[in-house]
Image (cartoon, rainbow, N blue to C red):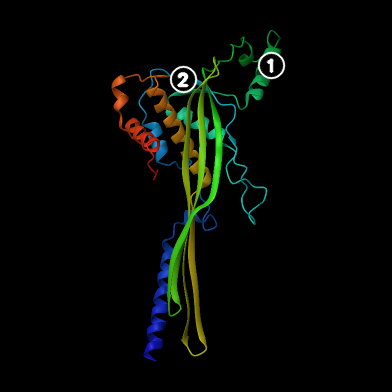
Amino acid sequence: MSIKIARGGLALGLALGLSGCAATFDHRADPSIETLAASLTPRMSSYQDLLALPEPRGRIVASVYSFRDQTGQYKPAPASSFSTAVTQGAASMLVSAMNDSGWFIPLEREGLQNLLTERKIIRAALNKPNVPDNNSEDLPSLLAANILLEGGVVAYESNVRTGGAGARYLGIGGSEQYRVDQVTVNLRAIDIRSGRILHDVMTTKTILSKEITAGVYTFVDFRRLLELEAGTTVNEPAQLCVLSAIETALIHLIVDGLDARSWGLANPADDGAPVLRRYREARNGVDGGATAG
């Protein structure tokens, strides 16, 4: 009887522990618990590196026509055989990163046709009576880019690494499993006048998914079975990992351009800035055959 009491107490303790975990679980991970207000998109450490870049000698006028998903990967069934595994908004992410870096003057090219249509409307209204104030002046020419940024999301690999561990004793136990996916981004800078590719960068970001479960399956008395289960799953948002890979590629592109003197710093003494030194070391590590962490 004492054994049954001990096992029952252990099962009850685990049940209370699981309920405590559920009580402290971050409700933001489950939208069904509470509806939260919209907020700014969270960013990874690469965004802080982007903001920490030294000031350029002059901002680079650059355009992005497209930054497509070139992986051809779709989400596995039963999610959807027609839903892509990678975001289709990578061009918008790249333009946002360019603008936040302070190194570029990005020009609108993805929606160029819409821009040209609005300019036609203004020209059609010029020199006519009752013209709105914002249509009464001649339009200046559109600004031309000096650099064209091209590339795309070139690879998405699922289950690059999987693993886990678990234990069970007298019907009480838990387990942990993880899966690592991988996304690869290519970014290149092209000279508008010559068409020559000035710099070309490829970056890779892992996407981690983890599942933790615990459960009880034991008899607490004759013909009395106790069964409890609890668990949680955490998935890194794929779109944030793509954004981080794009930001990292952009920083590497800027550093490569500095080393090749394609562009320069406002203060040459900033060439030893920690963020530049860190990315140079990362590049040299890859070139030297080191494995990225």
Write the residue at 49% across / 90% down: 222
Write the residue at 65% across / 17% down: 119
Identity, as a three-letter code, of the amino acid under mark 1: Lys
Indicate the quadrant containing the N terminus: top left, top right, bottom left or bottom right: bottom left
User: Which numbered mark, 2 or 1, is in the foreground of this view?
Assistant: 2
What SS does tag 1 mark?
helix
Q: Which mark is residue 82?
A: none
Q: Give the spatial CA distance, label 2 vs label 1.
A: 28 Å
Badge 2 or badge 1: first in the primary sequence: 2
Answer left or right for 259 relative to 250: left
Closer to the camera in the image, 155 or 112: 155
10 Å crowding of disc 2: few (<14), some (14-19), many (20+) = some
Q: Quadrant of residue 285?
A: top left
What SS does tag 2 mark?
strand
Vertical order, 69 against 125 (above or below): below
Q: x, y (%) of residue 31?
A: 53, 54
- Residue at the disc numbered 2: 60
Residue at the front extreme of this rendering? 289
Q: x, y (%) of residue 76?
A: 62, 53
Identity, as a three-letter code, of the amino acid under mark 2: Ile
| Figure label count | 2
10 Å crowding of disc 1: few (<14), some (14-19), many (20+) = few
Closer to the camera in the image, 124 or 130: 124
The answer to the question of whether label 2 and label 1 lie on touching residues, with beta carbons closer than 8 A, is: no
Q: x, y (%) of residue 154?
A: 56, 38
Q: Which mark is residue 120?
A: 1
Residue 202 visible within the image? yes
Indicate the quadrant containing the C terminus: top left, top right, bottom left or bottom right: top left
Q: x, y (%) of residue 156?
A: 55, 44
Residue 179 visible within the image? no
Residue at the top extreme of this rendering? 127
